[in-house]
């Protein structure tokens, strides 16, 4: 059933890149354990760059979430959808439920890319997400957000937020120090670092998937590792207590980030 | 990827480069007042305080890294045993971490303020990571 939320409070933190490659990584899994298989990537951004990450031209329009199957855009077995006005739709969650994405026994996996400018929408989705992936950059502005992020995590009783340090350039002293500070503060909640890699924008400019344009890309290797870690996180509740819900009856119990790595 | 980069990777038998060794001097790590400002922010401590409460109640989970845990305890950690006086050693005989640890041990006796120790504990941890090539 996994619903995976990708949202960063800071724009430009590679959230769309992360969501796209997470969907690609999970799509390579057969779905026999409820993870992978039928993957939908839903972007809620009004200025969406998702098609570029799949080698599609920018003019490619993605169908709405509720559009007919005939209108689907399928790339590598992933159904790409968009819902740019979900924040204004009071029935959005109900529609996700109707689509079977919130059911504990659903065989479908939904990766949702929520833009930085929609924190309220992300908050609505968070209780229903198996994992919340929060990309950050190793920059002072993201670092300054850490207290706020931890406070929000505490307020939502969320232990399912996992952080990813994106665009990490370890040749830069400040970036190294900020990343080290983040590791100290967040510990196992940081599940991956994705190195700064010029081949990522080059692949976008070439209208090619990164895996085709630069199979040896450092960022590609990193994001694949991240997908493996996320898969491990998703497997944890399945073996422990599948379908466990909280008192609202809607939100699944979320595994602690890093739990799978520690296992 | 550029052809010359790909060629070099092929010759090295690697799929990508990883930057791992960049020496940072201890003093360099102190240049960022943002770090110190964040360590003063009580919101950064909320989860650790809750975790500490859980541990006090018998929970077994340890969720904090040693440096942060040390920095967030209500009481300052007991000072390390005084470093024995010793003559200067030949260059390279003392590791960077030992040098900084000794510096901290000497400095902590004259600046007992908790805040200063918080920052120093964090910076020491970063220095140790750097000395091990993990920074």
Image (spheres, coloured by chain):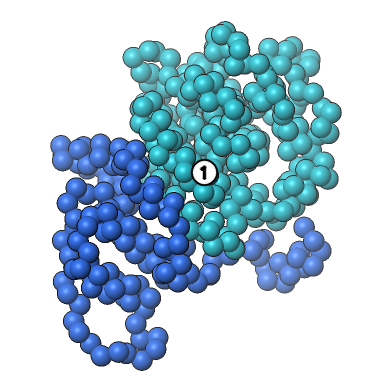
Which part of the image, by quadrant, shows the N terminus of chain B?
A: bottom right
As drawn, A64 above or below A20: above
As drawn, B114 above or below A54: below
Residue A191 visible, this orientation: no
Q: Residue at x 41, y 63 (%)?
A: B30
Judging from the image, mark 1 belongs to the subunit labelled: A
Q: Residue at x 54, y 29 (%)?
A: A4
Tag 1, which secondary structure? helix
Q: Nearer the viewer, residue B90 or B54?
A: B90
The residue under label 1 is: A142
User: Residue A47, percent across and down?
Assistant: 72, 28
Q: Is residue B74 left or right of residue B24?
A: left
Q: Residue at x 20, y 38 (%)?
A: B53
Figure chain in blue: B
As drawn, A65 above or below A4: above
Residue A72 visible, this orientation: yes
User: Residue B125, percent across and down?
Assistant: 35, 62
Give the quarter of the image for residue A45: top right
User: Residue A79, percent across and down?
Assistant: 70, 25
Figure chain in cyan: A
As drawn, B127 above or below A70: below
């Amino acid at each position: 059933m996994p619903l995976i939320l990708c949202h960063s409070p800071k724009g430009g933190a590679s959230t769309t890149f992360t969501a796209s490659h997470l969907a690609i990584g999970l799509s390579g899994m057969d779905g026999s354990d409820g993870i992978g298989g039928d993957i939908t990537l839903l972007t809620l951004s009004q200025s969406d760059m998702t098609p570029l990450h799949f080698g599609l031209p920018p003019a490619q329009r993605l169908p709405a979430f509720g559009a007919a199957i005939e209108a689907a855009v399928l790339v590598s077995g992933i159904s790409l959808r968009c819902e740019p006005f979900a924040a204004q739709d009071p029935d959005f969650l109900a529609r996700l439920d109707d689509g079977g994405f919130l059911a504990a026994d659903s065989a479908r996996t939904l990766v949702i890319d929520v833009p930085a400018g929609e924190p309220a929408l992300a908050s609505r989705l968070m209780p229903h997400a198996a994992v919340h992936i929060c990309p950050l950059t190793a920059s002072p502005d993201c670092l300054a957000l850490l207290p706020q992020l931890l406070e929000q995590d505490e307020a939502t009783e969320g232990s399912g937020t996992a952080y990813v340090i994106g665009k990490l350039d370890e040749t830069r002293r400040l970036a190294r120090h900020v990343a080290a500070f983040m590791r100290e503060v967040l510990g196992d909640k940081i599940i991956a670092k994705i190195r700064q890699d010029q081949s990522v924008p080059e692949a976008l400019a070439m209208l090619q998937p990164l895996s085709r344009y630069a199979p040896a890309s450092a960022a590609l290797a990193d994001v694949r590792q991240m997908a493996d870690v996320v898969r491990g996180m998703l497997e944890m509740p399945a073996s422990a207590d599948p379908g466990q819900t909280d008192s609202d009856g809607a939100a699944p119990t979320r595994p602690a980030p890093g739990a799978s790595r520690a296992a | 990827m550029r052809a010359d980069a790909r060629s070099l990777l092929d010759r090295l038998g690697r799929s990508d480069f990883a930057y791992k060794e960049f020496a940072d001097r201890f003093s360099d790590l102190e240049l960022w007042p943002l770090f110190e400002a964040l360590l003063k922010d009580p919101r950064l401590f909320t989860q650790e305080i809750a975790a500490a409460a859980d541990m006090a109640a018998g929970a077994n989970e340890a969720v904090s890294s040693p440096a942060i845990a040390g920095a967030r305890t209500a009481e300052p950690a007991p000072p390390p045993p005084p470093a024995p006086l010793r003559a200067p050693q030949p260059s390279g005989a003392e590791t960077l971490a030992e040098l900084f640890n000794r510096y901290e041990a000497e400095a902590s006796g004259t600046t007992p303020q908790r805040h200063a120790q918080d920052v120093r504990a964090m910076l020491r941890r970063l220095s140790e990571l750097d000395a091990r090539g993990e920074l």
